[in-house]
Image: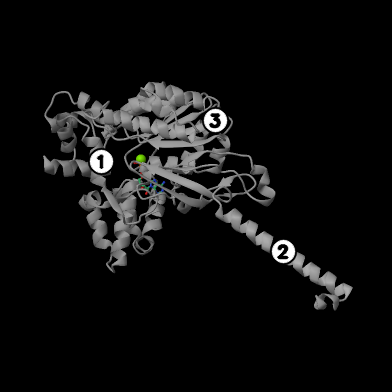
Amino acid sequence: MNWVNALTNGEIIALASVVVAAIGVVVAIWSRTRLTSSPSSLGQKLESQGTGASHTSEVDINIDNSRVDVSNSKRLHIGDAGAQYFAKVVNVTQGIDDRRSKADQKILFTLPPNPTIVIGREDDMIELKRRLGMSGELMRPYTVIRGLPGVGKSTAVFRLANEADVWQAFPDGVLWTHTDYVNENQRDSELDKANLMSKLCDWGRLLGNNEIGLCKTLDQAATHLRTLLHNKRMLLIVDDVWDARHAQLFKNVAGPQCATLFTTRETKIANALVDSPEDDVYLLGKLSDENGLALLKSIARSAVLDYPEECLKLIHELEGLPLSITVAGGLLYAEIANGFSPTDLIAELKHGLKLLTAGVPIGRPGRYEGKAMLTITVLLEKSTDRLDEEIRIRFAQLGFSPPKPATFELGRMSAVWAISNAKPTVQELVARGLLEPLEIGGQSRYQMHALLSLHAKNLLKTL
Ligand SMILES: Nc1ncnc2c1ncn2[C@@H]1O[C@H](COP(=O)(O)OP(=O)(O)O)[C@@H](O)[C@H]1O
Ligand SMILES: [Mg+2]
């Protein structure tokens, strides 16, 4: 070690400092690598499950001092059929440095995908949060969000579930599911029951309990789940209810500090779910012209910039329905990208057929990705297939040269249907959310949304 002896004291001290500093750097890099690569620390584990499919991927959850920020929908996006999946972020436990105080916190979520874009729902959000007891008023245990197919019920509720103040209000987390479409024949079938049981089991597992599946009946499973939720303050979301009895089951699950949100397109189901429909059913409305245009612009920007008047007319034709606007926007975008002028397409869209048969982008609400998985017709048939044949034919007959906007009074409908009393049919169509009662100048009329009117017209051709 001659070279060591040759060093002066000062040089030895300097060398030792360099070595200590180097060790410090190595340790810092090593610990940082561990923090960012381990699923139990910064990189959190996101598991997703769906019917027959599951995958696990890692996402970063950034925790700032006051909230867990998982608002980046890309990170939570878990597949195209987002509505069929749910995500669970397990053990969101810790940040680093000054965020260590969060270390023991355990938050449990099943978050639906966060819509990339939500336009014109600020007031609805405020009102829904008020109902959830987030503005000082008493929390309502159950709220049903009702609205036309495609008006944005899932989008609104998905966004709500992803907002930080909602997590603060429900510190034990958010549980989300959707119920399956069932027709009369499938109701109470073994498959129907098994589907419901699997949803209850999923929630049970998320609450750390694997025994729900051992219960013999759905009621027992619900009771078991309720005991798990008894001391929890959680937001429960049951999206797209097709059968009031399904939703009833989830009502029985909720603990006393939980709030439950349901969404449905059917008036009959909405009203059956709550004691006081006037108070507890929230009607989600269509978008204003301005917001409709903003939505169209977010998808087909140059069409709106270059053809503002035609686009505004199109929004009127589509009567502010986000689903129609989104699909029309996707078609316009493709038309322009292919170098065509959108004028012809806009004219065509007004006549509807193109709209009904175009693909609907599902799974990433608020963003058109051109991935056609469903058509609007298929979505609307979910409602009309549930009608008795006679009523379905009468619904279709209302599509025969409907007035614009398509509002009908009872006498006209009796004439179209050649029956003396149109009321029972009208009541059924209202119950299914296919007609909406209106008061115009003290007179009762019934309105059919433009998209449903197009669907009726199309259905008429197949009869
Ligand atoms: N407020 C909104 N802003 C932007 N896009 C919306 C909005 N509401 C709905 N959409 C779009 O319309 C489509 C239908 O909405 P969705 O929430 O599925 O309707 P619902 O659940 O009422 O049938 C979604 O895929 C989404 O792209
Ligand atoms: Mg929906």
First in sequence, mark 2 or 3: give its number. 2
Q: Nearer the viewer, mark 2 or mark 3?
A: 2
Residue matched to label 3: 233
Q: Could you tell me the amino acid type at mark 2?
A: Ile
In the picture shown, does residue 423 fall above or below 379? above
Q: Could you tell me the amino acid type at mark 3?
A: Arg
Q: Nearer the viewer, mark 1 or mark 3?
A: 3
Distance CA(mark 1)–CA(mark 3): 36 Å
- On screen, residue 343 versus residue 417, left or right, reads right
Quick one: 344 or 139, which is closer to the camera? 139
Question: Residue 223 sits in which quadrant?
Answer: top left
Distance CA(mark 1)–CA(mark 2): 66 Å
The image position of residue 162, as x and y in percent, is 49, 43
Q: Residue at x 20, y 27 (%)?
A: 425
Residue matched to label 2: 23
Quick one: 290 or 360, which is closer to the camera? 360
Q: Residue at x 36, y 24 (%)?
A: 218
> Decide: marks 1, 2 in contact (CB < 8 A)?
no
**Which corner quadrant holds the N terminus?**
bottom right
Q: Does the rendering let one see residue 277? A: no
Is the C-beta of the residue carrying label 3 under 8 Å from the nearest atom of ligand 2? no
Q: Residues within 10 Å of mark 2 (few under 14, many from 20)?
A: few
Where residue 380 is drawn, which disc sits there? 1
Q: Residue at x 50, y 33 (%)?
A: 208
First in sequence, mark 1 or 2: give its number. 2
